[in-house]
Amino acid sequence: MDISIRIGGEAGQGIQSISSIIARTFVRHDFYVFINQDFASRIRGGHNFDQVRISNAPVHAAADKIQILVALDKETTRRDIDCLADNGILLFDGDGIGFTSENPNHLSIPFAQIASEVGKSKIMINSVATGAAIALTDFELRQVLDCLQEQFQQKGPETVENNQKSATAGYDFVRQNLKEKPPFRVPPAKSVRQKMLLTGSQAIALGAMASGLKFYSGYPMSPATPIMEFISSQAATYNIILEQAEDEIAAINMVIGANFAGARAMTATSGGGFCLMVEALSLAGMTETPAVIVVAQRPGPSTGLPTRTEQGDLNFVMHAGHGDFPRAILAPGYPEQALCLMSKAFNLADKYQTPVIVLGDQHFNDAYFTVDELNLRDITIDRGHILTDQDLPTPQAYERYAPSESGISSRILPGHTKAVLYADSDEHTQEGHITESATVRNQMVRKRMQKLKGLRREIGPPEIYPSGEAELVLLGWGSTHGVIKEAVNKLNQNGIVAQMVHYSELFPFNPDHIAIAALTKAKIIAVENNYLGQFAEFFSKSTGLSVDQKILKYDGRPFTSHEIVEQVKDVI
């Protein structure tokens, strides 16, 4: 069973309300749901849609064809009608949006009239549409009504009752007027299981909180803002200080200051905001201060497409900053991985005293995933080597930047009673005092860059799916995980023996992972949401292996598995 429902309309029409109720209805009864959000950068108007995919097996990508299209405006009937499957059904309010159709699969429902008469307000159109869409799946109405009860109970019993009546009326209208039985039957509800519906942003935030986050500073910038919003909602409970800074420059400097003082701290932004952070990024590199920065990518250059998706900032974050200093770059592909990688990001930042960047993007950050379990046992906390009073029993001279084989020097925190901490953004001596000595300069640069050896060893291997050998490899990173995995399954079903090699730990590249049979014996096709194939070029440079073909998309929209499969067939 695999059904996709798309709700299209203008911003402000409550599209997310419908998708949220539908998604929670099915998730709470043991089904898997994936929601892809597509919206224009407008508060009101424009064309937007949420697409809810429902399955009895895990799904992590949007389908290319939809079975049910709910059109809240006329524009949806023009733009999205071609996405309907052959037996797909369109639900719309003919009088309300000024659209007519003779197609028997196009069902006009008086959403506005039902909402006004039954729900006592046109605002209830969303609940009418929700009930109508659920009716086409032949799922039990009771489950929808329970979700509406939870959704609106804080607004009082009258609001709950009006929404439930509206949903019931929409459900009944479809059952009474549909000429055939509901075509997309979902099995009856099973016993309720504790699945979660999480966005990528929420998973990143939860990973940070579980890893001991104590300070967050950020400036709102889509698609990173939901990270700050979620942490803000939990800050009081988990003793987290959250500061909405005046700009991104202030945000990262606050984060560096908090980390310098010993608190685990992070910020999140997008490409344009990260541009403003770059000078401070180099400050963290020079002072050897931990910092975790989430960069949720969107299409550039400049403002680009501010509410769309792209994997276009890999080259930028890999090389950002003046001068040479070490860093690590991670990029989760699904929520459970985001939880673990945030833990790893904080541990690497503390252990190697360097910035760590976590790459998301609009598709990953805003999409909703169904998660069976987030295993907090996978979270470990490694603060690195921080000296305490017991480590320095007597007052003594302390060398903050003392050389070592690993390049890592022991830290003390400001206010230590037995030693004085000196730090400087200029080049400095082992003690932390400013110097322009050529000899010391060479020593300090080599010391800092020595950390790359340790960081490389920490970088984990790519995920290979399925195991064994294949004639074709789809190479990807970050948010393309789910869609590439689905495409590989389809290719194998069509007789093309294929594998996914997916990287979530990107930089510095670990050479120990090069000699993988999947990479050395197969034709490699890179799949990326950018114009250049940035990871493919980095991969080839790091491994010496050639990428035979690239499947690239840079229109601001994520891949579907159908797109990948068709392009693979073309190139082979």
Image (spheres, grey):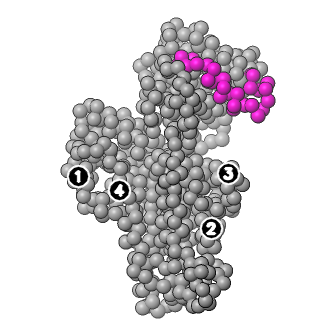
Amino acid on which the number 2 mark rests in the picture: Ala
**Residue 224: x and y, percent?**
58, 52
Amino acid on which the number 1 mark rests in the picture: Ala
Q: CA distance from mark 2 to mark 1?
A: 43 Å
Whichever of labels 2 and 1 marks the residue nearer the N terminus, that label is 2
Q: Determine contact: label 4, label 2, CB under 8 Å.
A: no
- Is 152 included in the stretch rendered in magenta? yes
Q: CA distance from mark 1 to mark 3?
A: 45 Å
Q: Which residue position is annotated with label 2?
A: 263
Q: Which residue position is annotated with label 1?
A: 517
Report the number of numbered marks: 4
Q: Quadrant of residue 238?
A: bottom right
Q: CA distance from mark 4 to mark 3?
A: 33 Å
Residue name at image x 49 percent, y 79 percent: 409
**Residue 484: x and y, percent?**
37, 42
Amino acid on which the number 3 mark rests in the picture: Gln
Residue 234's mark?
A: 3
Segment colored magenta: 135-162
